[in-house]
Amino acid sequence: MTDLRHYLQLRFAGQVFLMPNLPDILVEPRENMQVERTGRAAAQRTVQGVSWLAYALGPDWAPLPESGWTRAVFLGVGTARPVGLLVDDLHLLPAGDLRIAPFTPLGPAPVPGQHLFPGAAVGRNDLTLVLATDAVASYLRALEGDHGLGQ
């Protein structure tokens, strides 16, 4: 198991989420991205001749052509096909400052066998969902038709 020291606090689609800051994540500023639509992707980054697609998502997690994003958070950087989530804002939070509890969403998982939110950070007056990086990466890849969504 990875020694988790930090979480990324991500804001997109008017919502705030947490994501474990794992070694296979890369954050790129908008200036380093090619802002052009490729299928359902809103932007891309080309690395050694390979396009890494990045997606802007709405409140319903449907892809948007554009949003007010400032950074791309690429998941699965060590894999053959990294994929990015475009976020409006991002902060690094110490894991020790958070209390993460297991969370099981109702209904079927949007990616076969994987829910997007396996946990939640429980605060005094609020709750912030924690994203599963593998499930989010699978969901984003499925937007281009690589894998069927479990809807």
Image (spheres, rainbow, N blue to C red):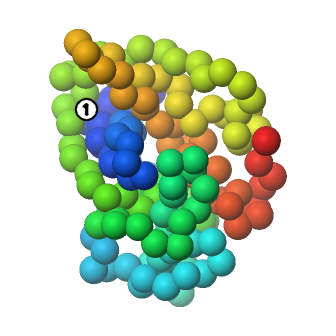
With 17 as the anchor, is 113 left or right in this view? right
Nearest to the observer: residue 90 or residue 78: 90
Image location (x, y in percent) of residue 121: 35, 22
Image location (x, y in percent) of residue 72: 38, 64
- Neighbourhood count class around disc 1 (C-alpha, 10 Å): few under 14, some 14–19, many 20 upward: some
Report the residue at 74% width, 29% height from top: 108
With 43 as the anchor, is 26 left or right in this view? left
Q: Quadrant of the C terminus?
A: top right
Image location (x, y in percent) of residue 140: 60, 56
Report the residue at 60% width, 42% height from top: 135
Report the residue at 31% width, 58% height from top: 88
Which amino acid type is shown beneath numbered disc 1? Arg
Q: Quadrant of the N terminus?
A: top left
Asked if residue 43 shows in the view, the reply is yes
Report the residue at 77% width, 48% height from top: 149
Question: For residue 130, which quarter of the picture?
Answer: top left
Nearest to the observer: residue 106 or residue 134: 106
Question: For residue 120, which quarter of the picture?
Answer: top left
**Rendered view: 97 above or below 39:** above
Asked if residue 53 shows in the view, the reply is no
Helix, strand or loop at label 1? It is loop
With 34 as the anchor, is 76 left or right in this view? right
The residue tagged 1 is 5
